[in-house]
Image: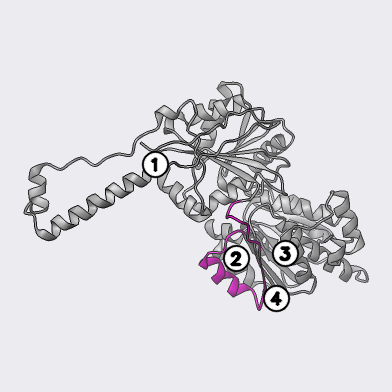
Amino acid sequence: MTFKDLGIIEPILKALEAEGYTHPTPIQEQSIPILLNRKDLLGCAQTGTGKTAAFSIPIIQHIHNSKIHVKGRRKITALIVTPTRELAIQIDENCTKYSRFTHVNNTVIFGGVKQGPQTNALRNGIDILVATPGRLLDLMNQGYISLKDIKHCVLDEADHMLDMGFIHDIRKIIAALPDKRQSLFFSATMPQSIVKLSHSILGNPEKVTIKPKQATAEKVEQALYYLSKKSKTKLLTHIIQENDIDSVLVFSRTKHGANKIVKQLGKVQIKAEAIHGNKSQGARQRALDNFKNRDTRVLIATDIAARGIDIDELELVINYDLPNIPETYVHRIGRTGRAKKSGLAISFCNIEERAYLKDIQKLIDQKIPVVTKHPFADEVEEMPTKKKPTRGQRNFNKPLKRTKDSDNKANRSKDKRERNKNNSNNNNEIRTFGESKNQNTKFNSRRRNKK
């Protein structure tokens, strides 16, 4: 199927052809006909599946067709709300690309920068507004924005907006919208909280769910390195130096950690920059542009700042710190392996992060292959063992007298331990990362026995 088969008008087809797009992705193929029929939509698809085009193309087409005979100052008829500045900028750029041969124009507003240029764009009149919740409410309260003419409303990355605490802002925005509108709700994950929110926003929506064979992007190869916390920077440096990879995106759990990694890499002449909430919007955009242009080889990002990063042919993502929210892992590694291209996602795991790893593997329903052969494998910490209490403590806490029931229980526990020991001796399959054009065989692996 082609975009033309979906009923897309010629000006948009021309723009898509200029971008090299000929065939829609599954979410585009399923969503675009629904949206062209002006129905509400609840869409669930993971990062990198083409959600932005799925909702923006039909909106641009509706506005273009309705404006052919309309004169006068433009009014905001479409609103796209998204959680982060970077994602808002990305969506706005895509809307500009898709609408280049139409009568539709758009702009983006977000916090962290002076509002003057944004309010000037609004005064000139626009059709599509892409916004983050905070700046949108701020300019609404100042009287620069009215939502009374909105005909299309999109909530993108809804799960992440809830994670960031935007639920009250979202409810205020929805309350300001006209009752008669087309509502679109997109989320990479669909927990109960998201379903509940969607019910309060959507009428009787059509549902589109793109289910991959696994929770993570299918083209992303994953690898796990066990190591000590103090060895993380050394292993990161080793991987970057030993592999011919142009761009590496590294995730840090904290802003301070991101800055620290940049300094450590700088000491060994690896050019790196960080983006996080403490950086100004200008600094974040410069760092992102440098990374896109290959002027900076390594970009260190926190989860909030990284939302919306869309780098062509990003080969490698490294989880320097494992996220404490399992869904975040899916979002992170979705930065690579986009648009049917392959990618590699490496995760570091120290002893304190084992619980996070367990939750992640439960969510994605797979065991991440372990790489045992690396320079810092010998520095892996052992799980702490509880000290045996003194005999006095045993007497104080629990009687020493044995009963028949307690003996039976002890025997059952012993049998269970023996079974677990036998099971643990079974080999875990360890993936082998083959040689590729831009990657040495440093990601070797083998079958190992747990000791």
Q: Secondary structure at mark 4?
A: loop
Q: Amino acid at mark 4?
A: Pro
Residue at 67 percent across and 75 percent down: it is: 205
Which badge, 3 or 2, is on the more N-terminal residue? Answer: 3
Residue 266 position by quadrant: top right
Q: Earlier in the sequence, mark 4 or mark 3?
A: 3
Q: Please name the colour scheme applied to the rendered image.
A: one colour
Residue under circle 2? 170
Q: Nearer the viewer, mark 4 or mark 1?
A: 1
- Residue nearest the viewer, comparing 205 with 62: 205
Q: Residues within 10 Å of mark 4 (few under 14, many from 20)?
A: few
> Which sits earlier in the primary sequence, circle 4 or circle 1?
4
Q: Nearer the viewer, mark 1 or mark 3?
A: 1
Which residue, given by chain and number where applicable, does mark 4 sit on? 178
Q: Is residue 172 above or below residue 21?
A: below
* 76 relative to 260 in the view: left or right: right
Left or right placement of residue 91 versus residue 417 in this view: right
Residue 206 colored in magenta in the image: yes
Q: Position of residue 310 (x, y in %)?
A: 70, 46
